Image (spheres, helix red, strand yellow):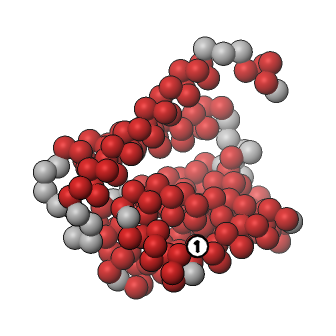
Amino acid sequence: MKQAMYGLLLYIFLILPPVANLLESIMIVHMHTQMPLLVFSGFLMAQFFQLRFPRFFAKWNQNGVPGLLLFLIVWSYWMIPRAMDEAITIQVVEIFKFISLPFLAGVPLRDSWKKLSTFGKGFIYVFIMLIFSLMAVLYIGTDEQICNNYLEVDQKTLGWGSLAMAACMIIYGIQFIFTDQSTYE
């Protein structure tokens, strides 16, 4: 239960207006820090919901695929530049961000992760790597301002940050393939 409390504290900290405004003021911090931390807070709080509503998760997310699909849909939505832009300008969309990322992405991801096969976990890994790669191409390759709330240089910075994340994920994937994982279990 300590994890759920830490997740709740992280969530409360992230929704404080000064913290949210600071994290949203820089585009790369908004996408690569605030959003993953919101998902992580939900990931930590999931234990509380799993203990509180075990039949719901057993019935709804029996093999982990529905939770995985919900996570992928929510995560993909928040990677769209317009969604990120509207989260800053429209209050209702920002509230939706603070609800959807922890509770519709983080909680289902935690519940699904144990139930997924190695193929399912690999699928999530490859999907996130491809999303980061596509975001890098989009933000680096576009010479126009995509988001109204950020400068073009912020977009380029986010593109290079996404490219660095994708490159690190590729390197980790190669390392994972070529090492004997049984020695680490």
Q: Residue at x 61, y 38 (%)?
A: 121
Task: Tell me: residue 42, above or below residue 64.
Answer: below
Image coordinates for residue 60, horizontal then vertical, percent: 68, 61
Q: Which element is circle 1 on? A: helix
* Mark 1, residue position: 14
**Quarter of the image that includes the C terminus:** top right
Closer to us: 42 or 12? 12
The answer to whether 95 appears left or right of 26 in the picture is: right
Instruction: Give the image quarter of residue 160.
Output: top left
Position of 174 relative to 141 (above/below): above
For the image shown, how many numbered marks are present on the structure? 1
User: Left or right of 149: which side holds 111?
Assistant: right
Residue 162, compared with residue 31, is above or below; it is: above
Quadrant for the N terminus in the image: bottom right
Q: Which one is in front, 116 or 103?
A: 103
* Depth order, front residue of 164/5: 164
Whether residue 53 can be seen here: no
Q: Position of residue 46 (x, y in %)?
A: 73, 63
Considering only vertical position in the picture, is 31 above or below 65?
Answer: below
Which amino acid is tagged 1?
A: Leu
Q: Could you tell me residue 96's position as x and y percent?
A: 48, 77
Horizontal and vertical percent for residue 147?
A: 24, 65
Q: Residue at x 33, y 59 (%)?
A: 80
Q: Residues within 10 Å of mark 1 (few under 14, many from 20)?
A: many
Which residue is pictured at 42% across the width and 70% down the height? 24
